[in-house]
Image (spheres, rainbow, N blue to C red):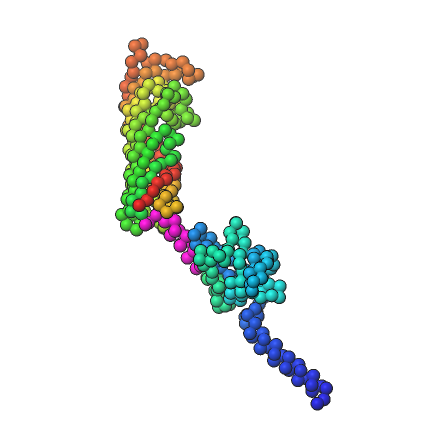
């Protein structure tokens, strides 16, 4: 056989062999164009107990531990290609199941020994055909992950919840509430508390606006909640306060914002709109945080004994026998709600 013919047959055989080997290679390039617009292939991992969604993608540096055929060594190498559950690393191929551990950012670590706590997704080749398919797939996986994450923190499994309002302790008030589930999206909540005064009746009002620690009495807040999702809600509440202030120094109901020595018997009626997030943790523990705004009418029976002069230290008595003048005052005041409650559900 002539040398030229032999060389032609060798090239033909080599080309045929190369084509078949490439067809069997799981790391071969896809059938569609591979320009800079081609989505990078990925492997998605979802942690179940403490929800997190992470990925292994092409071109990323993989940090982990490989355990295969009784051989165990560390990895810190770039992922060249991904095909299904297979990864190509610097001319060496391995399956995902050969990875003993993988480290990700935010202190998230995958361990094969803890694989029952993980879900692993190997996207099909069809999602990489174009960015629309790829983006649609990623969006759907992320949406489902967020929905399941919220479900894990949802309190919808509880029919009764008892909570304590931690924020109101700052105002010397002890408040507890009871919440009852009516339907999947509706609950009804009632909060009752008692506010204590202190020995600071002659001190200045907080920021010259709030007479903190000078009132004592009961506070009642009640209203329905409507859950917009698994954990987020809006609530319309009615407010009733009965408060007493005894021989205290305050600017409340005083003209011109001056300080007066007074006693008060006060009834407040108001409404407020709140938005909040209520979640569960550690099984039956409930955390409820909220913020809101509203208006209230303050109906005050005021006994005014005297008025303080400019230096807020010298008291000018209204009457020589130090008896008070009585006034009935109605004020409209804003309601600003901001708080955290903690409790248990059952």
Residue 106, image x, y percentages: 52, 49
- Residue 36 versus residue 154 in the image, above or below: below
Percent x, y for residue 7? 69, 83
Query: Which corner quadrant holds the N terminus?
Result: bottom right
Residue beneath the point at 28% across and 50% down: 183
- In terms of image quadrants, where is residue 278? top left
The residue nearer to you, when weighing 95 against 100, is 100
Q: Is residue 183 something that shows in the picture?
A: yes
Q: Is residue 108 left or right of residue 90?
A: left
> Which residues, given as a range, are shown in magenta?
140-157
In screen coordinates, is 298 left or right of 208? Answer: left
Looking at this rendering, what residue extends furthest in the top direction?
320
Residue 201 left/right relative to 66:
left
- In the rendered image, the quadrant that contains the C terminus is top left
Find residue 39 and report its horizontal and vertical position in percent.
54, 63
Q: Quadrant of residue 285?
A: top left
Q: Nearer the viewer, residue 279 or 101?
A: 101
Task: Tell me, yes or no, if residue 139 can be seen here.
Answer: no
Q: Residue furthest front?
A: 70
Is residue 327 found inside the magenta-colored segment of the image? Answer: no
Please, is residue 161 above or below residue 93 in the view? above
Is residue 98 depicted above or below 215 in this figure? below
Residue with the most extreme right position: 3
Q: Which residue: 37% across, 40% down?
A: 342
SS assignment for the magenta stretch, majority: helix
Is 149 contained in the magenta span? Answer: yes
């Amino acid at each position: 056989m002539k040398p030229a013919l032999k060389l032609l047959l060798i090239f033909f055989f080599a080309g045929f062999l190369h084509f078949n080997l490439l067809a069997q290679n799981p790391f071969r390039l896809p059938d569609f164009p591979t320009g800079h617009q081609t989505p990078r292939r990925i492997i998605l991992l979802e942690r179940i107990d403490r929800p997190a969604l992470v990925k292994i993608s092409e071109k990323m540096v993989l940090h982990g531990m490989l355990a295969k055929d009784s051989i165990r060594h560390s990895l810190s190498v770039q992922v060249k290609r991904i095909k299904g559950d297979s990864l190509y690393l610097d001319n060496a191929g391995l399956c995902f199941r050969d990875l003993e551990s993988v480290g990700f950012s935010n202190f998230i670590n995958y361990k094969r020994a803890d694989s029952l706590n993980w879900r692993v997704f190997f996207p099909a080749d069809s999602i990489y055909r174009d960015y629309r398919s790829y983006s649609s797939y990623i969006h759907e996986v992320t949406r489902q992950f967020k929905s399941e994450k919220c479900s894990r923190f949802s309190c919808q499994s509880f029919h009764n919840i008892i909570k304590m309002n931690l924020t109101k302790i700052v105002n010397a008030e002890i408040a507890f509430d009871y919440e009852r589930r009516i339907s999947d999206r509706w609950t009804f909540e009632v909060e009752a508390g008692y506010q204590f005064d202190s020995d600071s009746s002659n001190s200045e009002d907080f920021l010259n606006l709030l007479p903190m620690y000078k009132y004592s009495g009961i506070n009642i807040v009640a209203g329905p909640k409507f859950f917009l999702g698994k954990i987020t809600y809006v609530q319309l509440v009615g407010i009733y306060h009965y408060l007493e202030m005894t021989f205290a120094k305050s600017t409340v109901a005083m003209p011109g914002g001056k300080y007066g020595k007074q006693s008060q018997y006060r009834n407040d009626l108001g409404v407020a709109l709140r938005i909040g997030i209520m979640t569960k943790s550690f099984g039956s523990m409930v955390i409820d945080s909220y913020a809101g705004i509203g208006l209230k009418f303050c109906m005050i029976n005021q006994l005014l004994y005297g008025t303080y002069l400019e230096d807020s230290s010298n008291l000018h008595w209204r009457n020589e026998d130090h008896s008070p003048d009585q006034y009935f005052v109605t004020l409209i005041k804003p309601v600003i709600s901001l708080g955290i409650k903690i409790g248990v559900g059952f």
